[in-house]
Image (spheres, rainbow, N blue to C red):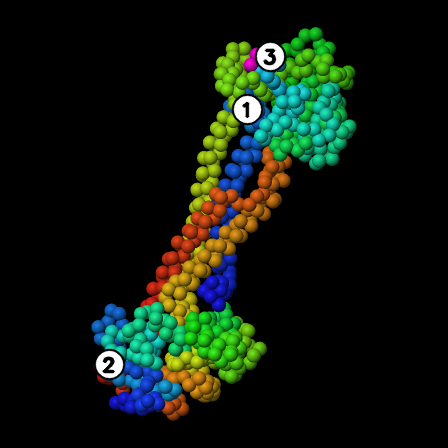
Amino acid sequence: MNMLKLAWASLLSRRANALLTIFAIAISVTLLLGVERVSQQTRTGFGNTISGTDLIVGARSGQVNLLLFSVFHIGNPSANVSWQSFTHWRDHEQVTWAIPIALGDSFRGHPVIATDEQFFNHFQYGQRQSLQFADGEAFSHTDHAVLGARVARQQNLHIGDDVIVAHGTGSVSFHHHDEDPLTVTGILSATGTPLDNAVFVPLAALAAMHGENHDEADSEPSPAHRPSFSDQRVPADDEPEHTHEHEHEHEHEQHDHRPLAEIAQPIDSISAFFIGLDSQPRAIFMQRMINTWGQEPLTAIMPGATLQELWRTLNMFERTLAIVSGFVLLTGLIGMLATLLASLQERRREMAVLRSLGAGPKTIFGLLVSEALLLTLIGIAVGLGLLYAAMLVMAPWVETQFGVVIHIGAPSMVEWRRMGIVLLAGLIVSFVPAWRAYRNSLADGLTIKV
Amino acid sequence: MALSTDSSLTPNGARSYSVDIRELSFHWRGQTSPVIDIPLLQIPPAQRVFLHGPSGSGKSTLLSLLAGVHTPQHGRIEIHQHRLNELSQSRRDRFRADYIGYIFQQFNLLPFLDLIHNVTLACEFSAKRRQYLAEHNKSARDEASRLLTRLSIAPELHHRAASQLSVGQQQRVAAARALIGAPALVIADEPTSALDADSREDFLQLLFEECAATKSTLVFVSHDSTLASMFDRSVSLLDINRAATAATRGVS
Ligand SMILES: Nc1ncnc2c1ncn2[C@@H]1O[C@H](COP(=O)(O)OP(=O)(O)OP(=O)(O)O)[C@@H](O)[C@H]1O
Ligand SMILES: [Mg+2]
């Protein structure tokens, strides 16, 4: 039986204390690694979400906010962009393609993206990968819809099924646009991005649901009377908006379904639009031009640059969390120190017996260090286990909430290094009780006053 | 002064002692007057020595000097041709593992190990004891088991945790651990003080038998003078330790 086995047996005999110590260390390890994991995963997850888009343009607002709602469907647009502004920039000579999107509605909790067929032609994610249809094709009629991969899987929907879009983004929607069921014409392949979680409808369909009626009306409805689809508020039952909604009902009923190609202006206003340029280096000039445009206050962002800004904010958050987990680790180690020190007094007998058998003070020192190392190692292992368990539990939730796919891979270099630091800290802390035991065993020899 | 003159002669006529102490003096750190001051103490191999003396006369201190846990400031202490006072601390630790079996008054066992492991623990620290067992074609576990049974510990107890035993049983396990691998010198510091009269005699009988079997020298400390007659020789610290004599005189 070597020192490690002896240390193990001794620890087992004090297992209540040992378990508490292990638990404290495990939790701090889970936190330390978890912070690293989360930031790493969000970085790759978010970084893969959009690619090949040079500019994102929305109404004047914060850059991060624009990025979050347009790409990740987190948060809301503060205002809309008029269709006229969109067409102005779409037709700009530098612009190769432009994708309009209008957000704000949902289908059974999945965000609805109203857009046009440009989305399927030009939007890219990951390493410049284009969208693929797993089944069917893009919409071509006002009553068509395309589903993200997970929507189809979760709701068990197939080509030809009907979907009914609800107002607002909550899972529980108070009133449905049930006047206008849309037919699924296409299902996208999985992308591992928030798009998997989205339902795509034509802009004209959204406009119709919200009571816009371009093709029959000869005059533009004044913006003041236009109900905003991006009004995310879910109205209470007794709110007047209800009756306001009902006013439009007759319009819905007489609405006819037409091929998208025949519609010149599908909608009055949109939430944002993506732009691809002829020459990517010109993005910065384009951005300035859009930001200083006199006709409508707009904000243009370069997705990569804004992501960087997001990471800077996240970095601070991450560092704070890392510091907090560092303190949790410190608490765990102090707990271990206290436990080991407290055990020394009652173990003076044990040490004297070992001394009588020929164990040197150095062996006693080693025994205490082994114990601390065992506790720390088990703590690290349990912490790692907790981390993986948490990831297994959290991954599906994160995927549905944020559309970010969590990859549960082996620990990274950074994580190994953090575990190494914990082990080293445990080793250093163990020197305190080990030194005490060393001194004790020299002074006590074989004569212990019990 | 009953200085030992008993001696055993080696075949070539030279005297060889298990314990050979000359002009030994030791004082605890921070103290000026010695607690041990022994001009001469010689114990021949395989002798059973009863060591007694009043409390505080330095019995336990002398035993820890014999075991090489502490080093004397002056004089010579030789055990089986090893001059302990000249060895480094780690050499003395190894020497103790190899040559000395030590039995405490009580709490001899590691409560979290079973009996077998408590006994074989002595072999973990000593290559010499392992070698002895290997030469006699015994495994440490078998020998531990045999010794325990010889010392009247029923085999079904051998895998119990040490904490489940009575004090008398614990002392016998401690004896088995001291004896395993046939150390040259067995030292016992009041091992029977926690036992009743009957088990005291039983314990001594068993200890004697096993010491005889391994030809180990036995130095046995006790306050119980009724046991003295069972030993080859009785030594009073008051007689051999000048420091103790002085101290006692001072008190009385
Ligand atoms: N670790 C120690 N440090 C300092 N002094 C000690 C230490 N151990 C013992 N002493 C002192 O040495 C003297 C002898 O003590 P020792 O324990 O050897 O006596 P003893 O003969 O074994 O007594 P008892 O019969 O009570 O066990 C005592 O005066 C004691 O105070
Ligand atoms: Mg004593």
Q: Which quadrant holds residue A240? A: top right
Mark 2 surroundings: few (<14), some (14-19) or many (≥20) residues within 10 A: some
Question: Considering the numbered disc 2 on the image, is that residue within a helix, a strand or a loop?
Answer: strand
Q: Position of residue B153 (x, y in %)?
A: 53, 81
Q: Nearer the viewer, residue B5 or A197?
A: B5
Q: Residue at x 65, y 27 (%)?
A: A131
Q: Amino acid at mark 2?
A: Glu
Residue behind mark 2: B23
- Is the C-beta of the residue carrying label 1 under 8 Å from the nearest atom of ligand 1? no
Question: Considering the numbered disc 1 on the image, is that residue within a helix, a strand or a loop?
Answer: helix
Question: Relative to B182, is A38 above or below?
Answer: above
Q: Position of residue A67 (x, y in %)?
A: 55, 26
Cα distance between the residues tagged 3 and 1: 22 Å
Q: Of tags 3 and 1, which is closer to the observer? A: 3
Q: Position of residue A428 (x, y in %)?
A: 39, 54
Q: Amino acid at mark 3?
A: Asp
Question: Relative to A406, is B84 above or below?
Answer: below
Cα distance between the residues tagged 2 and 1: 93 Å
Identify the image quadrant of the N terminus of chain B: bottom left
Identify the image quadrant of the C terminus of chain B: bottom left
Residue B152 falls within the magenta-colored stretch: no
Q: Of tags 2 and 1, which is closer to the observer? A: 2
Cα distance between the residues tagged 2 and 3: 111 Å
State the extent of the magenta-drawn residues as a range: A89-94
Q: Which mark, residue A66?
A: 1
Q: Main secondary structure of the magenta part?
A: loop
The answer to the question of whether label 2 and label 1 lie on touching residues, with beta carbons closer than 8 A, is no
- Chain of the residue where label 2 is placed in the rendered structure: B
Q: Position of residue A376 (x, y in %)?
A: 47, 54
Q: Earlier in the sequence, mark 3 or mark 1?
A: 1
Residue behind mark 3: A91
Q: Amino acid at mark 1?
A: Leu
